Amino acid sequence: MNKMNKDKIKTIVFIAVVIGLPLWAYLSGMDKHFTRVKIKHFVESYETLAPLVYIIGMTLLPIVGVPRLILTAVGGALFQLLWGTVYAMIGSTTAGVLGYYLAYYSTADYFEATTANKQNKLVSMLDFTKRNNFWLIFLARICPITHYEAINYICGTSKIPFKSFFWSTFFGIIPGTFVYVMMGDAIMEISDKHGILNLITDMTVGGKFGELIVDKDVKMLMWVMILLAIFLAGTLAGFYYIIKGEKKETAVKTAGTVVNT
């Protein structure tokens, strides 16, 4: 079997695993064991080893489809703001490295071989990503609507330089991790007092907004939502600025080529 076929098989297996594991967890009902409360109880049962178990969970559980938001929120509920942020950052960084190298060693060679000397929108987009890799990854990590694992896989597949990937990931996850940990602590408190759905109902159609907004945890949750909105607006503006700059640079180069010819 030649190298191209081996790389193709590795790519197919990787895609099957990435899609199949979360699907299997959902269809088998395993996802019901990955609730915030159950994960919290499982981690804290290890007592002194809880931080290590939590970091391992942050690294591996997203592979089977556990939302990173839930895991980060558990960190806030278990370890409070400071250490919850530290442990969540370590877990998110190791998860990023794991996802990057899984894709790098499974799909990168095959993708590179099949896209060599080709010109299409996908290849052009990846070339654009490589040229602006640090800031694009940095902004994507802050943006609250991007998929964390997908970024890891795309970066590994497209052979984004690891050093750039690592540092843009490390610095990019700081704002979101801090906010999600803070939100996690607030959510757990609110769940115990009111229940999240009951809270939303009471504050909207229940007419208890003024009564509930004085609760310190409700206030914190409101501030978190405001911060996430700011993150979204800021990152979208950043993406727009980078794309606009790229188009301007391309136009200048094209004009220069026309003049020279």
Image (cartoon, rainbow, N blue to C red):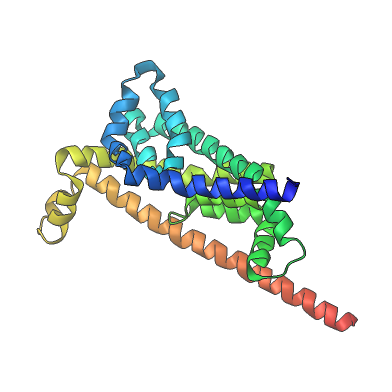
Point out residue 250 in the picture as x, y percentages from the top left corner.
73, 73
Toward which corner of the image does residue 177 lie, by quadrant? top left
- Of residues 196 and 105, the one drawn nearer to the viewer in this rendering: 105
- Residue shown at 72%/70% (left/top)? 119
How many numbered callouts? Answer: 0
Q: Is residue 215 above or below residue 43?
A: below
Q: Residue furthest front?
A: 1
At horizontal 66% and vertical 68% (from top left) the residue drawn is 245
Residue that appears at 71% across and 59% down:
114
- From the viewer's perspective, tell me whether residue 219 is left or right of residue 243: left
The furthest residue to the right: 261
Please say whether residue 152 is visible from this viewpoint.
no
Percent of width and height locating residue 252: 76, 76
Residue 184, how many percent across, how many down?
A: 32, 40
Q: Nearer the viewer, residue 121 or 250?
A: 121
Task: Establish if 28 lies above or below 87.
Answer: below
For the question of whether residue 254 can be seen, the reply is: yes
In the image, is residue 98 above or below residue 124? Answer: above
Q: Nearer the viewer, residue 222 or 106?
A: 106
Quadrant of image for the C terminus: bottom right
Q: Nearer the viewer, residue 125 or 192?
A: 125
Quarter of the picture holding the N terminus: top right
Residue lying farthest top? 48
Q: Residue at x 10, y 59 (%)?
A: 207
Question: Which image quadrant for residue 121?
Answer: bottom right
Q: Position of residue 189 (x, y in %)?
A: 22, 37
